[in-house]
Image (tube, rainbow, N blue to C red):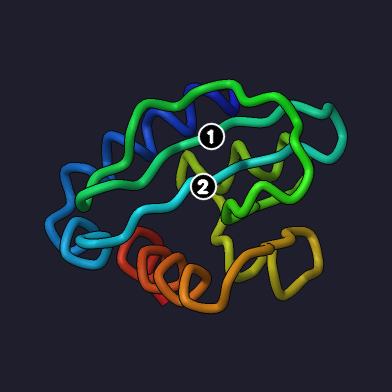
Amino acid sequence: MSLNQSLVSFQQRANLNLRVQRIATGWSQKLVVECCDTDQRYCIEIRDGRLSDVQVKPIVENDGCLLIRGQEDLLTRIFNGAHHPLTAYNDGELEVYGEQRDQVKLDAISLVMWGA
């Protein structure tokens, strides 16, 4: 499964999850997933409690998004549910950049989607 396919699958699962929808209600943000080894970059827009379609995004520095960065293989495993993002973050394999409020929302969604 490719990273794009994993992101689409994640987007679909998140949009079917009522708890994720409640967490994301009233939250508008761009979630950007960036591969540090291949320079691939994908964007999922969060709006009105839903995650939009996954799109390839050109690299633009400091555009106010919530950025998740890691190796493509790791990101693929995370978004298809095979690897817990907290484990990757604690091991220094996953980087997350953005406003504190956005990171808290992302943490809450991670707990719902992957568990503690």
**Is disc 1 surrounded by few (<14), some (14 to 19) or many (20+) residues within 10 Å?**
many
Is residue 23 toward the left or the right of residue 70 in the image? left
Rounded to the nearest angstrom, the CA distance separating label 1 from label 2 is 6 Å
Circle 1 sits in a helix, a strand or a loop, which is it?
strand
Residue type, numbered disc 2: Leu
**Which residue corresponds to the image point at 67% horizontal and 63% vertical from the top-left?**
96
Residue at the right extreme, as displayed = 37
Circles 1 and 2, Cβ within 8 Å, touching? The answer is yes
Is residue 39 toward the left or the right of residue 56 in the image? right
Q: Quadrant of residue 54?
A: top left
Viewer-proximal residue among 46 and 34: 46
Which quadrant is home to the C terminus? bottom left
Question: In x, y percent, where is residue 112?
Answer: 31, 66
**Which residue corresponds to the image point at 74% horizontal and 51% vertical from the top-left?**
62
**Which residue corresponds to the image point at 23% horizontal and 62% vertical from the top-left?**
26
> Is 21 placed above or below 89 here?
above
Question: In x, y percent, where is residue 102?
Answer: 48, 68
Residue type, numbered disc 1: Cys
Which quadrant is home to the N terminus? top right
**Is disc 2 surrounded by few (<14), some (14 to 19) or many (20+) residues within 10 Å?**
many
> Is 16 placed above or below 108 here?
above
Question: In x, y percent, where is residue 18?
Answer: 12, 57
Residue pointed to by mark 1? 43
**Which residue corresponds to the image point at 35% horizontal and 37% vertical from the top-left?**
11
Residue pointed to by mark 2? 31
Question: In x, y percent, where is residue 104?
Answer: 46, 77
Q: Quadrant of residue 22?
A: bottom left
Circle 2 sits in a helix, a strand or a loop, which is it?
strand
